Amino acid sequence: MSFRLERGAAVRPEGGVAFRVWAPRAGCVSLRLERAGRAHDFELAREGEGGVFAAHVAEARAGDDYRFCLDGGEGLPDPVSRCQPRGVHGPSRVVDPDAYAWSDAGWRGVERAALVLYELHVGTFSPKGDFDGVAARLAELAELGVTALELMPVAAFPGQHNWGYDGVFPYAPHVGYGGPEGLRRLVDAAHASGLAVLLDVVYNHLGPEGNVLPAFGPYFSERHQTPWGAALNFDGPGSDEVRRYFVDNALHWLAEYHLDGLRLDAVHAIVDLSARPFLAELADAVRGLERGLGRPLHVIAESDANDPRLVRSPARGGLGLDAVWNDDFHHAVHAALTGERSGYYADYGSAAALAKSFEDGFVLDGGYSVSRGRRHGASARDVARDRFVVFVQNHDQIGNRGFGERLDVLVGPAERRVATALLLLHPGLPLLFMGEEYGERAPFLYFVDHEDEKLREAVREGRRGEFAAFGFPDEIPDPADPDTCERSRLVRDDSHEAAARRRLHARLLELRRSEPALRPGAALVHTRHDEVTRWLRVDYDAQRGRPLFAAAALGPCEAALVAPPGARPWSLLLASEDPAFGGAGTDAPKQLEPEARLTLAPASVLLYAAEPA
């Protein structure tokens, strides 16, 4: 399967541009082409009875700006705009996706089990704050052991700086980041560095400013409501074209920009009661494109529903997505190491919760949730661990705190090393948040740049109200202040301590590559734990490769436990308190007999492997 986008503006090989737009609410549609300061109008003809209008304009070419006029009204940008050069309120621009000279013909992608994701916000990752600024750092990420970038949303949004979840033109890379050409250059450079690139896309809502979709058709439905208002129309009258709009969007990113996958934002907020859910349709379309391209394409969902059906195969009643973000692991680690128990952390904090996240995937898998006041989730014990994305930091878990504190600000260095080890020894797919690898301490705050002052004030008030219960609403950084974005920019640290942190990440990622038992989905994982002295032992029993076990002391006291049984002694592979990693030193035995007593230093992790036969 190959893919060509038929809606919007398509540059034709024979010359000219074919314009096509779905506008069932309009009686007539015209095209206003802008060139050299002059406007030229062309009528579009109705195609059949589906509400699609089209025209081939021989004199149009790539680089022209245009708008659609509905029933003689003011011109509006194209819902399928590939570029918004003057922002979300300006005209759309014709882009030729075949004009870029790609150099990645030999790229074969990254298999799911080899994914080590690195989530970043393009605008604050580098001093330049654009795609080229990201490209300049690719070599160091590849050297660390990262295998895939995961970009926070880049679809055109109002203003200059934004998290990206207020995007309103899902097909148009933000011009402040470098627009379509900048994104292509980044993906091309990433592939040359051996890195895949995944993009965060938002199919559960659009931003409030610059959203033109309701003027064109029934993209939204009042039948269902979401935290952002009326839900996108995935199951009502007119929903066939709405579903096509977002399926085409996914395929366009993967085909036109050579991306390797998508992260679907908050799929629990996609309301769809149809017999064949939109997400299943999307997964099927991506599988078809994957077969045509001959390389892996990944569709990863974010969901707080703890629903394993997202990643089960269609043959087993699932939706067929590749993986799902597992917030439970984050909450279990965070609560155990920080002691926080407010909000959803009330369900976590125990060694048992952390053990369950290793062994079963979800912690809340049908049991009672204190924070929700009801049962939550379903069992995922039948789901391979390489279907879960795990993390100890991400944009939400940092940025949705009042002051955007990273874990390095909340816990000490030893506890932070424990978090790193638990993450990279987990049998799931690990995700790092930008700067985590060296201990970035700059906050990652929530910020927007709406042009509508009333909307800016509404965001301010909403943010203050959200944290009023904590007693500091007036102190919360103003999301609309440009300084809030600037404070979130990576500072970067080249100190001895930062280098030690990088070495810990690099060593753990090297072990994930070299030890078959640590490859996601390859091993059977069994756990032991103790709540009194707060230790966790994880045993890895691989079908291929030698057995391993990891032991972690979660609290401020020493912990004593027993090594697993076995036919051979255990050899030490890694100690989190090794001075090379910034630790205070370790007297852990280099060799350990099966079932021997092992004492762990406070807040430390040891990794052992069975000696060769």
Image (tube, rainbow, N blue to C red):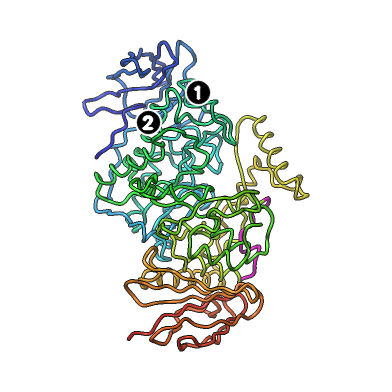
Label pair 2/1, CB-CB below 8 angstroms: no
Which residue is located at x 59 percent, y 82 percent? 560
Q: Is residue 236 magenta?
A: no
The x, y position of residue 496, in whole percent, is 55, 73
Element assignment for label 2 = helix
The magenta stretch spans which residues? 402-414
Q: Say what amino acid the circle numbered 1 marks.
A: Pro
Q: Say what amino acid the circle numbered 2 marks.
A: Arg
Quadrant in which the N terminus is drawn: top left
Frontmost residue, 178 versus 452: 452
Mark 1 surroundings: few (<14), some (14-19) or many (≥20) residues within 10 A:
few
Frontmost residue, 433 versus 368: 368
Element assignment for label 1 = helix
From the image, tell me which residue sits under label 1. 214
On the question of residue 342 being in view, the answer is: yes
Q: CA distance from mark 2 to mark 1?
A: 16 Å
From the image, tell me which residue sits under label 2. 244
